[in-house]
Amino acid sequence: MSSALPLLVFGQAYFLTPAFNTQSVAPNFTSLPNNDLTKRDDYTYTPGIGAHKVHTQLASWSDAWVKCRDEGAHLAIVNSQAESKLIVQLLAKADPVKGGNVADFVHIGFHDLYQKNQWVTIKGQSLFEAGFSEWYQGEPNRLDGNEHCGSIHRRDGKLNDQSCTSKMTGFVCELRSA
Ligand SMILES: [Ca+2]
Ligand SMILES: [Ca+2]
């Protein structure tokens, strides 16, 4: 840092550092995208609720967690009844599911991997704190004692526990900025 060498050339300041001193110009900050303001074409923005994207391919919950993260988002967290209803609408509008039979449930961002029966979102809030904790009838049922990851019913918007490693058709990502 202390080795940064400010130069004034033709009225513009250039800061040369060892890492950049082979470059001839300073970065043009006006050309950098502003992630808070630039909308992504692949996400659906809903005022007051958030920005969501439905994926329709076959994936485990763990695969889905990684895929959402890799595209700069996270597995969706349902924060209200309105968001549950929105996700149902988005799932209904999504392209036909690829790679398998259409399952009733799709992965979203909650689990009880930290402590059995303590369901938390991937940001660590309880479902109640997050704002939506309505389970599908008979859920969570801990099928085979091995259901530690969360999903949402594609038509009624309520929650289910399922295996973290079984592949299901579809998941929903949500942008961090939402
Ligand atoms: Ca949300
Ligand atoms: Ca279940």
Image: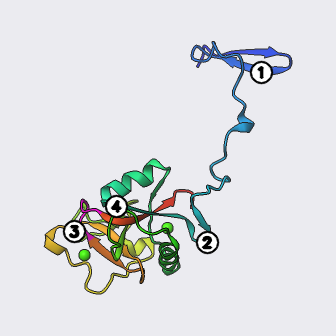
> Compared to 73, does 47 lie above or below?
below
Dot 3: within a 10 Å radius of its alpha carbon, few (fewer than 14), some, or many (20 or more) residues? many
Asked whether the residues under the numbered discs 2 and 3 touch, taking CB atoms below 8 Å apart as contact, a structural biologist would say no
Q: Earlier in the sequence, mark 3 or mark 4?
A: 4
Dot 1: within a 10 Å radius of its alpha carbon, few (fewer than 14), some, or many (20 or more) residues? few
Q: Earlier in the sequence, mark 1 or mark 4?
A: 1
Q: Earlier in the sequence, mark 1 or mark 3?
A: 1
Which-is-in-front pick, marks 1 and 4? 4
The image shows residue 33 at horizontal and vertical percentages of 66, 43
Give the residue pinned by disc 4: 58
Q: Which mark is residue 13?
A: 1
Q: Which mark is residue 147?
A: 3
Q: CA distance from mark 1 to mark 3?
A: 58 Å
> Going by the picture, which residue comes out furthest to the left?
144
- Residue 77 falls in image quadrant: bottom left
Give the residue pinned by disc 2: 48
